[in-house]
Image: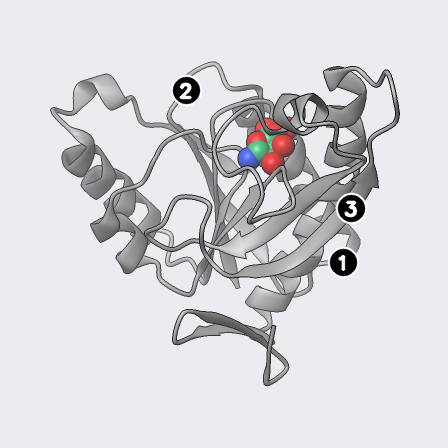
Amino acid sequence: NNIVVLISGSGSNLQAIIDACSNGVIKNSQITAVISNKENAYGLERARAANIEAIHIAPKQYGNREQYDDALAERIEQFNPDVVILAGFMRILSGDFVRRFKGKMLNIHPSLLPKYPGLNTHQRAIDAGDTEHGTSVHFVTEELDGGPVILQAKVPIFANDTVEEVTARVQKQEHAIYPLVTQWLAEKRLTMIDGKAVFDGEIL
Ligand code: GRF
């Protein structure tokens, strides 16, 4: 199976998936390209270090979101991906783009969805006084952070935790669950049917 990963930043989730491909947690699959909208995303260096094609596509070269998303989709399709992974890709994707990769594209969002779609999730959970927080892997649909959830991991929030401490605790869980769900999609144990996530024939 071919996996294409989209990033904008550090790429620690990308690294977890690279490692999972090399240590056999993800079987019979390889990341064929990593694409970033940000030229200096550290994740591009992680890709190069793993001998994976690292591509930067700059939004400012395109007139609008649709043109950018068309160019991005065409580049992705050149790699014939079975799975497209959003790993900290910080752009809203147009409906056409999302439909092109329907059922093949996953995102990880750092909250217990449906709580806290959007940005600054850790700070929002702390500010709300939540004692429980976490991360969610979901299929990407046209609704931002609104596609069907496949797997979540929970972490506690303790009194006086800083946002850095909470972020680190959540990210550790992300690195455990994202490779696992990627493997499920690659081996087709996981599908999206009528907008619902289905795993081993059961609706989640
Ligand atoms: C992750 O926390 C993910 O949940 C969010 O963006 C962050 C990306 O981190 N969508 P990294 O680039 O994988 O380190």
Name the N-terminal-most of marks 1 and 2: 1
Q: Residue at x 34, y 58 (%)?
A: 101
Name the N-terminal-most of marks 2 and 3: 2
Picture colour scheme: one colour
Q: Residue at x 76, y 58 (%)?
A: 25
Q: Tell which of 52 and 90 is nearer to you.
A: 90
In the image, the residue with mark 2 has its CB under 8 Å from the nearest atom of ligand 1: no
Judge from the rendering whether residue 5 lies leftward or rightward of residue 200; answer left or right. left
| Rendering coords of residue 164 (x, y %) | 75, 17
Residue tagged 1:
25
Name the N-terminal-most of marks 3 and 1: 1
Name the residue at the left extreme. 63
Residue tagged 2:
38
Q: Secondary structure at mark 3?
A: strand
Q: Residue at x 42, y 65 (%)?
A: 103
Could you give the CA–CA distance between mark 2 and mark 3, rounded to whole angstroms? 30 Å
Position of the C terminus by quadrant: bottom right
Could you give the CA–CA distance between mark 1 and mark 2, rounded to whole angstroms? 29 Å
Q: Secondary structure at mark 1?
A: loop
Residue tagged 3:
154
Looking at numbered disc 3 in the image, what kind of residue is underneath it?
Answer: Lys
